[in-house]
Image: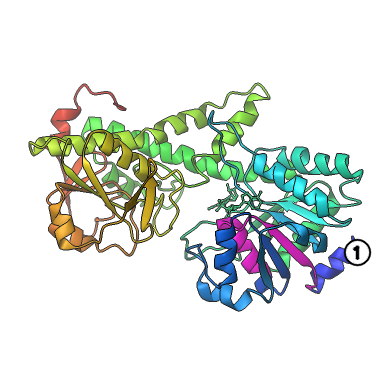
């Protein structure tokens, strides 16, 4: 341990990051900035090529950041032999759900198989991928101990440290977000804390890898459940003729005991829709059925359908069927200011509208194109003509750079699922069934009459 500790202290340690996606590239860049020699491994040759030519594909990392580090302290490669040089190996691979919505940890297992081929004694191995409690022990510690005949905490070191990066967040980044770390043993935890502490602002140790795994799942389950709560209250307020946006604004004036969450067209990204399912799946192995998680998943995943039902209601009021109507979707990314489409609720809204035979187009400054049922779809330009040609414009993702006044001025019908048009004067329909005229919220008769006797999730 003393040798690797010394290398961390004088920054001569070599770090290998496996998986150069949103998480891995951010960690690799930060470690390289701290003077570590970093090898980033990714099986996606296109990503490796882009990095090698000084280009970033992650919206929070600038090309200049890559250009100053690449070929010097940062090397992007598509094979695993650099692990032989590594003092620290950080695994940042995807942890999706499979077709039956169960955890798919196969990429972690495949990385461990590659590590075993090259790893040398005294290496510190850290898992950053979000996963269920017990993964680090089962898939990393035990497998390497069995295959190599080594003992964790003595011959090699193992930690879990969840990545808490929030893409698009301008205030908090990898460096200034406190880093949780749990080790297989106190020695492992100490090494992990020393490593991250050498280039991140704050490290918070917890008692075990399972505790560190659970911290991340608590954080994301908290978000999923609270978003679901406000989404369900939106549907309830809709029935009751109460404006949820006004209620949230007013409740947010309470300086203690309340944290505002906002309704929306559904949840997306790699984390919030997936991570809680990892936890409920694991809990079932302990005979525990987690009701909150399942319920939140059910409510959140039905929001795109609710959005489409409100679009249908609005058009109906203006004597237009959804079929053959021109619908312009604003924003396809799963959340504002990112170029990530994964699990985006906008994709489902888009598909559902197409299934109802609407003519659907989209505008997203961060997503120039995407594949829909095998066919490439391209973003239109946001011009007054494109807006005016649509029978209805629906704001799904509230990117900061979008010209909302242009949309408000030119849209025949505007439906805003994020209340991003709040500062603007106009005739705007909001998620939850209210219209806003200027700064005044009015209950819209469209929704009042039409909602009676209808099920929440039709
Ligand atoms: N994206 C986020 O905001 C975020 C935040 C916190 C935690 N996480 C978690 O971090 C983990 C990684 O997420 P991400 O968003 O960076 O994923 P990502 O899909 O953006 O990146 C993963 C990368 O791994 C590469 N890869 C896949 N298999 C590989 C293999 N066998 N060897 C080498 N490279 C391989 C892929 O090509 C890809 O570039 C996940 O567990 C996720 O839940 C993500």
| Magenta run includes residue 141 | no
- Viewport quadrant of the N terminus: bottom right
164 over 458 or under it: above or below: below
Q: Name the residue: 52% across, 41% down.
A: 222
On screen, 239 above or below 55? Answer: above
* Residue 29 belongs to the span the image colors magenta: yes
Residue 23 pos. (x, y %): 59, 56
Question: 354 or 431, which lies in front?
Answer: 354
For the record, the magenta segment spans 11-31
Q: Badge 1, how many Cα within 10 Å: few under 14, some, many 20+?
A: few
Q: Residue at x 60, y 63 (%)?
A: 48
Q: Give the residue drawn at x 61%, y 37%.
A: 104
Q: Is mark 1 within 8 Å of ligand 1?
A: no
SS label for mark 1: helix
| Residue hosting label 1 | 2
Question: 253 or 299, which is in the foreground?
Answer: 299
- In the rendered image, residue 334, in percent from the top left (x then y), is placed at 41, 49
Residue 173 at what x, y percent from top left? 55, 63
Q: Determine which quarter of the picture holds residue 378.
A: bottom left
Q: Is residue 49 above or below residue 439?
A: below
Quadrant position of residue 352:
top left
């Amino acid at each position: 341990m003393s040798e690797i500790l010394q290398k961390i202290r004088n920054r001569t340690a070599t770090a290998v990051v496996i998986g150069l996606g949103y998480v891995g590239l951010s960690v690799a860049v930060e470690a390289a900035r701290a003077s570590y020699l970093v090898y980033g491994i990714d099986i996606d040759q296109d990503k490796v090529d882009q990095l090698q030519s000084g280009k970033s594909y992650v919206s929070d990392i600038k090309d200049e950041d890559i250009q100053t580090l690449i070929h010097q302290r940062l090397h992007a490669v598509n094979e695993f032999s650099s692990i032989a040089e590594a003092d620290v190996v950080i695994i940042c691979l995807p942890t999706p759900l499979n077709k039956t919505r169960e955890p798919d940890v196969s990429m972690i297992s495949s990385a461990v198989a590659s590590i075993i081929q090259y790893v040398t004694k005294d290496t510190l191995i850290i898992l950053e991928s979000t996963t269920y409690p017990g993964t680090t022990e089962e898939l990393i510690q035990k497998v390497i101990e069995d295959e190599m005949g080594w003992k964790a905490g003595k011959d090699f070191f193992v930690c879990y440290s969840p990545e808490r990066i929030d893409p698009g967040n301008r205030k908090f980044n990898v460096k200034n977000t406190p880093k949780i770390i749990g080790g297989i043993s106190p020695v492992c935890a100490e090494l992990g804390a020393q490593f991250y502490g050498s280039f991140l602002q704050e490290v918070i140790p917890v008692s075990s890898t399972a505790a560190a795994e659970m911290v991340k799942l608590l954080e994301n389950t908290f978000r999923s459940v609270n978003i679901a709560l406000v989404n369900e209250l939106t549907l309830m307020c809709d029935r009751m003729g109460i404006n949820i946006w006004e209620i949230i604004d007013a409740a947010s004036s309470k300086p203690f005991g309340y944290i505002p969450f906002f309704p929306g067209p559904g949840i997306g990204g790699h984390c919030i829709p997936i991570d809680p399912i990892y936890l409920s799946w694991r809990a079932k192995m302990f005979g525990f059925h987690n009701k909150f998680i399942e319920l939140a998943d059910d409510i959140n995943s039905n929001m795109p359908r609710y959005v489409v039902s409100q679009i249908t209601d609005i058009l109906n009021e203006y004597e237009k069927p959804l079929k053959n109507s021109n619908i312009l979707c604003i924003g396809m990314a799963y959340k504002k200011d990112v170029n990530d489409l994964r699990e985006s609720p906008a994709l489902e809204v888009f598909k559902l509208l197409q299934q109802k035979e609407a003519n659907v187009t989209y505008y997203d400054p961060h997503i120039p194109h995407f594949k829909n049922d095998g066919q490439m779809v391209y973003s239109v330009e946001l011009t007054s003509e494109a807006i005016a040609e649509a029978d209805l414009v629906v704001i799904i993702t509230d990117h900061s750079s979008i010209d909302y006044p242009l949309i408000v001025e030119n849209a025949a019908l505007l439906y805003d699922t994020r209340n991003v048009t709040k500062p603007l004067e106009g005739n705007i329909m909001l998620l939850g069934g209210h219209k806003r005229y200027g700064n005044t919220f009015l209950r819209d008769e469209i929704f009042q009459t039409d909602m009676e006797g209808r099920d929440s999730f039709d």
